[in-house]
Image: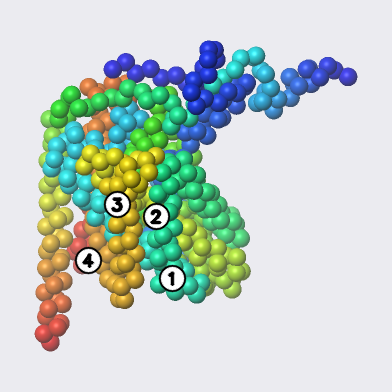
């Protein structure tokens, strides 16, 4: 196939195409074109800073200060290159990752990827609702009230029958994450500590089991399997065109930069506990401790931002599941379709939300076991998803000019090797706890 | 005073909105645009893999088997521990 890419979506002469907006300036046309494409990259990156990420980054700050900031800087290009692969594949094929794996690798890999993703996403969804219950509980709202309201909100967000309406709500939730920057600035970290934290180093105390676990958790939370499936399906549902590739790359990069900045701010917020020698249990407890130190804005801000992170994470993770299921089953699966035209797609989403909310409301639900399950499944899912994706991107017969270049492969295989080792370490560490010395 | 058109053309922001070259540009949202032909794998069958790619896939299957085995071992171990605790 001869793939032609034009730099800007411009038609300078002739009758207006249907649905087109006319502008008189080339620059404004470029800006508008970008804004029309913008969305999937920002949403997937910011949603990655879900409740689990808030917990991981703030814990890193509370335990090791800013000595792991450099790791986030290193993860910025890694997360961009990984997501850029799914952008290219999604635009080139107009299909989601699950469908491509099923079609090109056969039923075994297709079913493994699908069911592992569905299970992992469902368990992660349970942890999101647990975080909503925890954060709003700290604000005095009982779980029997907060969890059903959150579930209803998540369902309403999606069943509007309009991709754009859902995207605008999601982008608004992403923008709320600017609150982390405000709270981090309010904590006034020592500039020299921030700068020195950006330099690669081993934290004081050396390499211990708990440090390894935290590093692996940081990497695993920054690059999560569901992101690969979500962004490719989102790009396909939004019907991005070949000429939108560079704009979507920019969208993805901006999203990555924003999310890494937020992650650093979360670490800086956790750092306040470190400098005051205060214990860390979870983000809600941390918010309570920070209230007297930073003021009530920080305390309530952290709790509400936790809820925001959980809601955004829940929405995107469940959509990734619904899209993947619809793609593999051959059901209609688009946010552009109303419920009556895509009943299977919306049913997967709604059932997952309702089931996860119900589990969290069970007294003494085994949430710690679920968190462990998430870590093990992620250790299974991420290496396989990313390797299959890399093999798909080398399919020149299908993708032509969109296939990986040699430098893409060098970078991607290096990233894959590192992620593979880290995922394996995490999974083994969880499954065989005595294997690594405690720290 | 310079002619209004000169002031306008010197203002960089004017170029965003003003008639820069007299042409009209049409911008179409992806969802409103005509569907384009995509790369379609339907006619291609299974992906053709090189030997090294097949080795990578086999290694991946091996890794998945090991981790799954470890997970089953851990679950059985925990179940035995829980059972022993209940009996005592």
Task: Give the residue at the far bottom of this rendering.
Answer: B88
Asked whether A265 or A167 is in front, the reply is A167
Total marks in image: 4
* Residue A30 placement: quadrant: top right
Q: Which residue is disc 4 drawn over?
A: A433
CA gap, disc 2 and disc 4:
38 Å
Question: Which label's residue is closer to the chain start, 2 or 4?
Answer: 2
Which is nearer the eye, A136 or A390? A136
**Closer to the N terminus: mark 3 or mark 4?**
3
User: Could you tell me which residue is drawn at 39 percent across and 61 percent down?
Assistant: A151
Q: Chain of mark 1?
A: A
Label 3 secondary element: helix
Q: Kindly indicate whether the residues beneath marks 2 and 4 are on one polypeptide chain.
A: yes
Give the x, y percent position of residue A285.
46, 72
Residue that label 3 marks: A347
Between B44 and A147, the residue placed more toward the observer is A147
- CA gap, disc 1 to disc 3? 23 Å
Viewer-closest of A121 and B78: A121
Residue bearing mark 2: A155
* CB atoms of marks 4 and 1 within 8 Å: no
Instruction: Check chain identity for marks 1 and 3: say if they share one.
Output: yes
Task: Please tell me whether mark 4 or mark 1 is closer to you in this view.
Answer: 1
Q: Tell me: B51 left or right of A30.
A: left
Alpha carbon distance from label 3 to label 4 = 38 Å
Q: Do the residues marked 2 and 1 share a common chain?
A: yes
């Amino acid at each position: 196939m001869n793939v032609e890419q034009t730099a800007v979506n411009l038609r300078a002469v002739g009758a207006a195409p249907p649905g087109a907006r006319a502008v008189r300036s080339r620059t404004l046309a470029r800006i508008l074109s970008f804004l029309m494409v913008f969305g999937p990259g920002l949403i997937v990156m910011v949603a990655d800073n879900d409740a689990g990420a808030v917990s991981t980054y703030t814990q890193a700050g509370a335990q090791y200060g800013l000595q792991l900031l450099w790791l986030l800087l290193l993860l910025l290009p890694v997360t961009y290159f990984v997501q850029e692969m799914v952008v290219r594949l999604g635009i080139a094929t107009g299909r989601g990752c699950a469908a491509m794996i099923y079609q090109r690798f056969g039923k075994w890999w297709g079913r493994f990827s699908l069911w592992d993703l569905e299970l992992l996403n469902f368990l992660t969804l349970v942890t999101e609702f647990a975080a909503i219950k925890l954060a709003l509980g700290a604000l005095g709202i009982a779980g029997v009230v907060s969890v059903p309201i959150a579930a209803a909100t998540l369902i309403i967000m999606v069943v509007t029958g309009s991709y754009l309406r859902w995207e605008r709500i999601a982008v608004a939730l992403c923008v709320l994450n600017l609150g982390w920057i405000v709270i981090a600035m309010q904590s006034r970290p020592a500039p020299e500590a921030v700068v020195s934290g950006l330099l690669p180093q081993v934290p004081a105390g050396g390499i211990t089991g708990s440090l390894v676990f935290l590093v692996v958790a940081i990497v695993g939370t920054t690059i999560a399997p569901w992101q690969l499936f979500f962004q490719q399906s989102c790009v396909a549902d939004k019907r991005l065109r070949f000429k939108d590739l560079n704009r979507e790359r920019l969208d993805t990069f901006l999203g990555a930069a924003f999310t890494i900045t937020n992650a650093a701010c979360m670490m800086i917020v956790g750092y306040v506990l470190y400098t005051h020698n205060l214990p860390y249990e979870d983000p809600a407890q941390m918010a309570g401790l920070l209230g007297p130190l930073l003021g009530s804005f920080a305390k309530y801000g952290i709790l509400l931002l936790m809820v925001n992170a959980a809601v955004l994470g829940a929405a995107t993770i469940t959509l990734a599941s619904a899209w993947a299921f619809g793609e593999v089953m051959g059901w209609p699966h688009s946010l552009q379709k109303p419920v009556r035209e895509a009943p299977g797609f919306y049913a997967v989403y709604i059932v997952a939300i309702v089931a996860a909310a119900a589990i969290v409301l069970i007294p003494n639900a085994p949430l710690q076991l679920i968190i462990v399950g998430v870590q093990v499944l992620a250790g299974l899912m991420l290496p396989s998803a990313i390797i299959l994706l890399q093999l798909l991107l080398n399919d020149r017969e299908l993708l032509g000019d969109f296939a990986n270049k040699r430098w893409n492969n060098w970078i991607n295989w290096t990233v894959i090797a590192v992620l593979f080792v880290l995922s394996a370490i995490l999974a083994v560490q969880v499954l065989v706890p005595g294997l690594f010395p405690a720290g | 005073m310079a002619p209004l058109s000169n002031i306008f053309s010197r203002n960089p922001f004017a170029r965003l909105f003003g008639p820069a070259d007299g042409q009209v540009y049409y911008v179409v949202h992806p969802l409103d645009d005509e569907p384009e032909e995509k790369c379609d794998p339907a006619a291609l069958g299974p992906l053709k893999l090189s030997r090294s790619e097949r080795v990578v896939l086999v290694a991946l299957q091996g890794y998945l088997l090991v981790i799954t085995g470890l997970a089953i071992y851990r679950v059985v171990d925990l179940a035995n521990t829980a059972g022993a605790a209940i009996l005592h």
